[in-house]
Amino acid sequence: MTRVIFATLFYFGTLNAMVWADDPAQVSDTAVRNAVSRSLSFLEKEGVAWMEDHRCMSCHHVPFLLWSHRSAQAQGFTVDSRKLAEWDEWTRKDSLANRNLFTLRPYDLGRPEAATLPLAVKDKLKPLIARPFQTEAGFLAELTPLLTEDEMKSHRATVLKISERPVAIFDRVGGGLESLGPLLIASQGTASVLAQPEFRDGVIDLMNQIQLADGSWTPGGQFSGMRRWTLPTANQATTMWTTLALASYDTPDPKRSASIEKALAYQRLQTPNPDNREWLAMRLLFERQFGSAEDVAKLRQQLLDARNGDGAWGWEKGVPGDALTTGLAIYVLAKVRAGDDSSVFRDARKWLLASQQSDGSWLTPARNFTNSTDPERLKVRDEIYHYWGTAWVAIGLLETLGKSGS
């Protein structure tokens, strides 16, 4: 029944967009601001509920709760700064709680690598067992008082080696790679605790650590498992987002610069996949940052040509328009500004404003993105894409303010 209701609402929302009257007031900046304002209420309600119910940020909820509200605040919307600060702090703590790089476990003292440790030293290490530490400095600060100066000199490296927990790209380290990128982009230039060096530099360091030897980043379960795309395309998408996140900060950092250079070299060797509209939009944003004006113009035209007749974009070639991809597309076009896209923004606004739901959200059917046909799994993914799509629409519409000629 839920799937039938979802499909029916989405159908009538799309139908409304197709028959929307050609009234400039209906797609004006004022109309857009009203629509975004309504969506923020939905995003807050559902985003906070996700925090409370799931206890994890997830790439599709908390980062986009923050991004949408930060963007709205930058456009003059009244955003409760106290709530925003609370969400930032919750996110910071969640990320740090999943960034335990040093934990001495009981059986680590029996590993072959620990054979050189005297029994007296092992006994002194017991207060550290099962205590998680997010940095080497934090671990050493607790280790140093436990050992003599000579013991530290002789056994420091061994203790660090047996206590270090390797960072794997599929771990939800720091909250997950797909969460960390949007967090960096959304908080850049703000007073958020997420933009402060203590947090930001830790995120950048994690990204450096989990970058693969070829310069790419592999997506985690959410970004790869919930999309109907090949692994090479998913790798490119993840690499482009992560590289853009790293480039959003210009603080001097040799490691960050090296990661970006490796990622650029990787991306230049990959086969394009413009039939995937998410890849296409992201590649346009990527080339705007790192490429030539010629490449930007070519990709922009490809993205414009990919529009459906109703002014919306579908996630891949031959798929009906959806809110998530349309929001992403207008966000990118508004950021790039490589030509006059005012009529494009008006058409997209018409489709989006007419398909907005009564609660301020936009429905985005998961079946347009995923291969799954299991009803229960699709029901869960519909909820996720419902939120994800609404956030991207809000972010995209905010970027078009003042750029549609209406």
Image: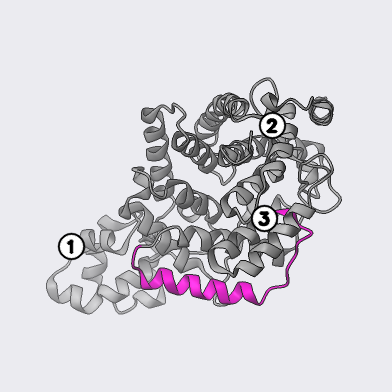
* Residue 233 seen anywhere in this rendered image of the structure: yes
Task: Tell me: 208 left or right of 220.
Answer: left
Give the number of the mark in front: 3 or 2. Answer: 3
What residue type is disc 1 on?
A: Leu
Numbered tag placed on residue 281 in the rendering: 3
Residues packed near mark 1 inside 10 Å, few (<14), some (14 to 19) or many (20 plus): some
* Residue 356 seen anywhere in this rendered image of the structure: no
User: What's the colour scheme?
Assistant: one colour
Q: Which span of residues is magenta-colored? A: 251-278
Dominant SS in magenta: helix
Residue 35: name its quadrant. top right
Q: Relative to 214, is 247 above or below?
A: above
- Image quarter in which the C terminus is found: top right
* Residue 269 magenta: yes
How far is the residue under mark 3 from the one under mark 1? 54 Å
Task: Tell me: 112 left or right of 124.
Answer: right
Residue wearing tag 2: 362
Numbered tag placed on residue 146 in the rendering: 1
Residues packed near mark 3 inside 10 Å, few (<14), some (14 to 19) or many (20 plus): many
Q: Position of residue 43 (x, y in %)?
A: 56, 30
Q: Position of residue 119 (x, y in %)?
A: 25, 71
What residue type is disc 3 on?
A: Ala
Q: Relative to 98, is 376 above or below?
A: above
